[in-house]
Amino acid sequence: SFEGRVEVYHDGKWGTICDDQWDDRDAEVVCRQLGLSGTPKALSWAHYGQGSGPILLDEVQCSGNELSLDQCKKSDWGQQNCDHIEDAGVSCDPFTGTHVLLCQLDCCPFLLPPLAEGTVRLAGGHSPSEGRVEVYYNGDWGTVCDDGWTDVAAQVVCRQLGFR
């Protein structure tokens, strides 16, 4: 799924995020952290239902450039003044903006718009922000040879994938 209440895992437990200061820049970081592209949208007031258990984060203020929520300005873990009616949510709509495959094994291409020649993805990494670079060309995915590969080339791929 590409939308829902945001929950984070910290210190051995799952918890929600309070929607104080929650905006589309925070949603952009969540979508990036989940490896989803499209148009990030922040949703407040427990739009996707109230969570249970601890509220672990409050006052999250991302610039939108971070790779994970952990890099954003925020209250200390567990420090909050909220109730679950303020649980934060996001929508990372894959049918808007730049399209990236959601199905790693091309299991559901009928759900996605046609891919443009030159679309890139990362495969085989330990997180959505790392892996082997693959390019879509002539109806198929292929790898990129590392001859002449530079940090500048890596930065271009990162920008194509929505990282900054």
Image (cartoon, rainbow, N blue to C red):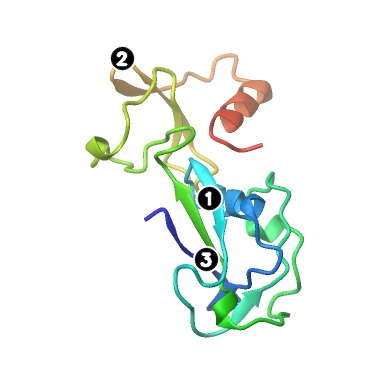
Q: Name the residue under label 3.
A: 6
Q: Which residue is drawn at 55% across and 77% down?
A: 15
Determine the CA span between mark 3 and mark 2.
Answer: 37 Å
Seen in the picture, residue 16 relative to 135 is either above or below; the reply is: below
User: How many numbered markers are drawn?
Assistant: 3
The crowding category of the residue bearing disc 2, from other C-alpha atoms within 10 Å (few below 14, some 14 to 19, many at least 20), is few
**Amino acid found under the numbered disc labelled 1:** Cys
Q: Please state, as top left, top right, bottom left or bottom right, where the N terminus lies in the image.
A: bottom left
Say what secondary structure mark 2 lies in. loop
Rendered position, 14 above or below 28: below
Seen in the image, is 80 located left or right of residue 115?
right
As measured in the structure, the alpha-carbon distance from the residue carrying label 2 to the one carrying label 1 is 28 Å
Mark 1 lies on residue:
31
Residue drawn at x 47%, y 46% as measured from the top left: 36
Rendering coords of residue 97 (x, y %): 49, 34
Please name the amino acid that badge 3 sits on.
Answer: Val
Give the label, 3 or 2, closer to the camera.
Answer: 3
As drawn, is 128 to the left or to the right of 63? left
First in sequence: mark 2 or mark 1? 1
Looking at the rendered image, the quarter that the C terminus falls into is: top right
Question: To which quarter of the image does residue 117 belong?
Answer: top left
- Real-space Cα separation, disc 1 to disc 3, in angstroms: 10 Å
Q: Which of marks 1 and 3 is nearer the N terminus?
A: 3
Residue at 62% from the left image edge and 51% from the top image edge: 24
| Residue 2 in picture, x, y percent from top left | 41, 53
Which residue: 61% across, 83% down? 83
Q: Nearer the viewer, mark 2 or mark 1?
A: 1
Q: Nearer the viewer, residue 2 or 103?
A: 2
**Residue closest to the eye, 144 or 159:** 159
Residue 138 marker: 2
Find residue 60 and report its horizontal and vertical position in percent: 70, 63
